[in-house]
Image: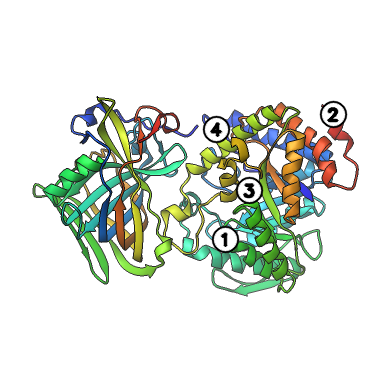
Amino acid sequence: MPLFGTLDVKPRLVEAPLLERLESEPWELPGAEVLHLLHEIDDGAMLPLLPPALHPTIPPTCHVVVTHAPESPAGPFVLAQVRVGCRAGAFQRGLVTRAFCDSERAASELRRRFGFDAVRASVRLLSRYDRVEAEVTLAGRRILGCGLVDPLAIGADDVRYVDALNLARVVRDGEERARLVQLDAVYRISRADRGRPVIEALDAAAWRADGLVPRWAVSGSFCRADLTLPRPRYLVDPLRPALQGTERV
Amino acid sequence: MKFGIFFELSLLRPWDEEREHRLYHDALEQVRLADELGFDYVWAVEHHFLEEYSHCSAPDLFLTAAAVQTRRIRVGQGIAVCVPQINHPIRIAERAAVLDLLSHGRLDLGTGRSGTWTELGGFDADPDETKKTWDEFVRVIPRMWMQERFGHEGRSFRMPVRAVLPKPYQKPHPPLWVAVTSPGTEVDAAVRGLGALGLSTGSLQEYEGKIRTYKRLIRDCEPVGAFVNDQVATVNFLFCHEDEAEGVKVGQRITGTFNYLAAQLLSTREAFPTRSYPSLGLLPGPRAEAARRGEGGGPSDSITIGDPTRVTKVLERWESTGIDLVNFLVNAGETVPQEQVLASLRLFAREVMPRFRREAPSAAAGAR
């Protein structure tokens, strides 16, 4: 059998988002910009970063995703996420280790509705003709500096994103339970560029990703898209193999 | 319709030298039996770094062992990866020629370009380039075989004039194929006069359309070699048992394991945005079909598992599409004991194969 993660989720649950209801309306994010960087990471870190429900990708990977939403039900925001590439059973997923958002209101709603472990920070996404840059600063400390160099247009159909999993506390049958909340965002891409991915700085501890070191750049893309964040449809028990522990909402 | 067996050589954790040793030697025992039973082909893949899914990185070595232990069955390299960081074209031509000599002219050479980032990234190869390098390789390899001396100034490699040696036993050269997983590669195959190996996308109805397109285009092709290899092959799963329910149950263990292992790898499509890789990696067609349910919730009606009657019915559907060759994956992750795999092959050869053949079944099929 493929390897399973070894992350002890209990300490994470203390600060994990609480979803009291799962009946959130979908969020429409028209005209969004999405920077996506994929790197291979040290294999020593891959198992401690994932809960026992999930398998690491072969090879182990991390995704950096920075989304600028000029419009949303909570107003404009920029959201940065670090995800660990994984498989829930046979399905491609990315486990969000932590997220930072430049809007307090949006961060709060993203936590409450979709389970993003998002807190306020300075998050910036800047696109130029020769590069795309993103930066996250928390309490004056730069915890992410990354980007994409020499973007070249590619087909909108060439880009593929994997669905996110957020570790959260979810109220089910009146009880609070640890669950991975699956978020199947829908991307309607109108323009896509590909370029050389660069990560200048990534403070793994700040992203709750101790040991995560991006070692080998794989790909980078920058897209303009209309996004839909639908209501969560699947929950995964983080302690059981996803094949057995997945529940449809 | 012809039949073959197809090896990925998958192995579940924990793997060690004893289990890898047994995996290879169990596979060779299956090849020897398949040869006796009248199967037409044995194919072996070339994959690198694909943990559990495939421990078959040197198919020409495996097939050499298979060739010297058998008499009749053709040995198919399915495929040689035509990416210069992985294989230099001269080395592909040389090693294939040696295998053809040692097998007394029983080699079919499949070509392809790898579908996973796990492999391409491991060799630091550029996914945008692999279609182009494949196209260059399939045009030069037959010339290396047929010309006494050969020189080349190309896109991915150059060489002054040299004699590429040895030359294959088959003249003018062994049949050439290309692995077809991405939509449209059947067209690439047809216009170059190559056999379409493992045409593996879509439903049976979609297959019919693709085979019609292939057969129409290949009539007017400009072959990259000295002759046209007008054949379409597909890959399927095989488990044949006297009891239908048991056959389906064990067969689904094979398909489920195969799908699960394949899904853990990083396909190029998932990792690297490019037009060059429109489909999701390894054998997407059989994987999708294996996951699909047929009428009544049973297995898909295109997967060859069950009792001889069910397997025959499925193959009749395949035969109606105009397919020339069906290659079977007979195990996955060694989840089915060797004796059951051998029994499945014998039952298939005794009860099913004759219905698609003019000649009588081989004597070995009666053995238990």
- Residue A228 in the image: state x and y as whole percent: 30, 53
Q: Mark 2 points at which residue?
A: B367
Q: Are marks 4 and 2 on the same chain?
A: yes
- Rounded to the nearest angstrom, the CA distance separating label 1 from label 2 is 42 Å
| Kind of element beneath mark 3 | loop
Residue sitting at 47 percent across and 40 percent down? A90
Q: Do labels 4 and 3 share a chain?
A: yes
- Rounded to the nearest angstrom, the CA distance separating label 1 from label 3 is 20 Å
Chain designation of label 3: B
Q: Residues within 10 Å of mark 4 (few under 14, many from 20)?
A: some
Question: In the figure, is residue A212 to the left or right of B179?
Answer: left
- Residue B53 in the image: state x and y as whole percent: 55, 40
The amino acid beneath tag 1 is: Pro
- Rounded to the nearest angstrom, the CA distance separating label 4 from label 1 is 30 Å
Q: Mark 3 points at which residue?
A: B45
Residue sitting at 29 percent across and 58 percent down? A35
Q: Mark 1 points at which residue?
A: B183
| Kind of element beneath mark 1 | loop
Q: Splitting the image into 4 quarters, where does residue B135 fall? A: bottom right
Q: Which is more N-terminal, label 2 or label 4? A: 4
- Rounded to the nearest angstrom, the CA distance separating label 4 from label 2 is 30 Å
Chain designation of label 1: B
Chain designation of label 2: B
